[in-house]
Amino acid sequence: MTLRSSAVRARWSTRWAIAFCGGVALTLIAAAQAAEPGESDARLPLWEAGIGVGTLVLPAYKGSSTTRVYVAPLPYFVYRGEILRTNRDGVGLKILGAQTWKLDLSLSGGLPVQSSGTKREGMKDLPLVGEVGAVLKYDLFNSPSVQWQLRLPLRYASGFHLSGLQSVGWISDPGVWVSGDVSLLGARWDWGASVNVNFQNERFNNFYYGIGAADATPTRRRYSASGGYSGADLRAGVVRRIGGIVATGFVGMSNISGATFSNSPLVQQTTNFYAGVALFWVFDKSKEVATVINRGDMQ
């Protein structure tokens, strides 16, 4: 990823704050569910609420050499119910489950893409994208301090416009997730990491990388993407909690070498790096304790 002063654009506006909260809040909160020092994991509160601020640095889109910086306030909410959960895994709604596997709700999304300053210059900006589906989770290995889990998700994506929804397409990003905690410098640190491969259908890939006749130029040929393999991602994050303050951060890398759209004129590079940090203040929590503690609750 090339960091150039002309390519790095910082924004603080209502539009981007809303987009950031909607598309990235769960990513930054993803690991931020650690128990307070001295608090038994078996006595975690049923819910916690707070507020914070986060910064995210990422490419305009995968394959772009333009880097964008977002800063925005973030909500913090954790709910540890038997069926409904909001924790480091995001929002979960247990549909079916057994001792080693469960079928869960899967939510994800993507931030808006502003075409200005990218290879999409002159093309329409892309909207905030939301993805909804299901994920099959299988526990590969469990111990008091670490968990390995296989996840097989399938989601449908839609773009959000003021005039309504735009169909984006199907995406599946199966992978392996590992999480745990470690004692370092006399303090407890919760951590998580994942590696996954991406598969997207033709409509999805053309949403980001297709070039119609109206957008073709002498230096940007018309292009139609096909569906199939769409790259891989590697992510890792850590959390430190001190009383009512939660600090979290993550780094990630995406690689689209061999992706079906890697020869699109909109692709400038095959590897991108991204990162985010957030700081939260937890100002309230329930007196009632959770009756079921999942690994995603940072037990």
Image: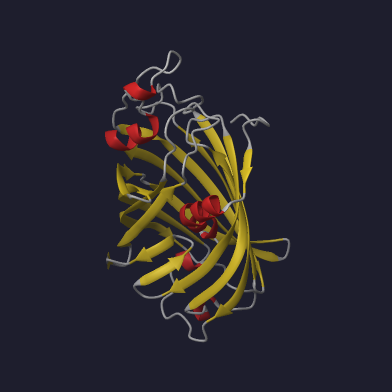
Give the number of marks: 0
* Residue plotted at (48% across, 68% down): 297
Tell me the residue at 43%/13% (across/down). 218
In the picture shown, does residue 29 fall above or below 253?
Answer: below
Above or below, 221 against 62 in this view is above
Residue that extends furthest to the bottom in the rendered view of this protein: 287
- The quarter in which the N terminus is drawn is top right
Q: Quadrant of residue 72?
A: bottom right
For the residue pair 94 and 162, the one nearer the viewer reads as: 162
Answer with left or right where residue 141 lies relative to residue 14.
left
Q: At 57% across and 68% down in the image, what residue appears?
A: 34
Residue at the extreme right of the image, as rendered: 185
Q: Residue 171: give x, y in percent of width and height.
A: 32, 43
Residue 257 visible somewhere in the drawing? yes
Residue found at the far top of this picture: 218
Name the colouring of the figure.
secondary structure
Residue 201 visible in the shown view: no
Q: What percent of the width, then of the height, locates residue 185?
A: 73, 61
- Image x and y of residue 198, in percent: 37, 39
Of all residues, the one furthest to the front in this rendering is 163
**Near-viewer residue (165 or 253):** 165
Identify the residue shown where x is 47% and y is 79%: 46
Give the x, y percent position of residue 116.
53, 32
118 and 255: which is toward the camera: 118
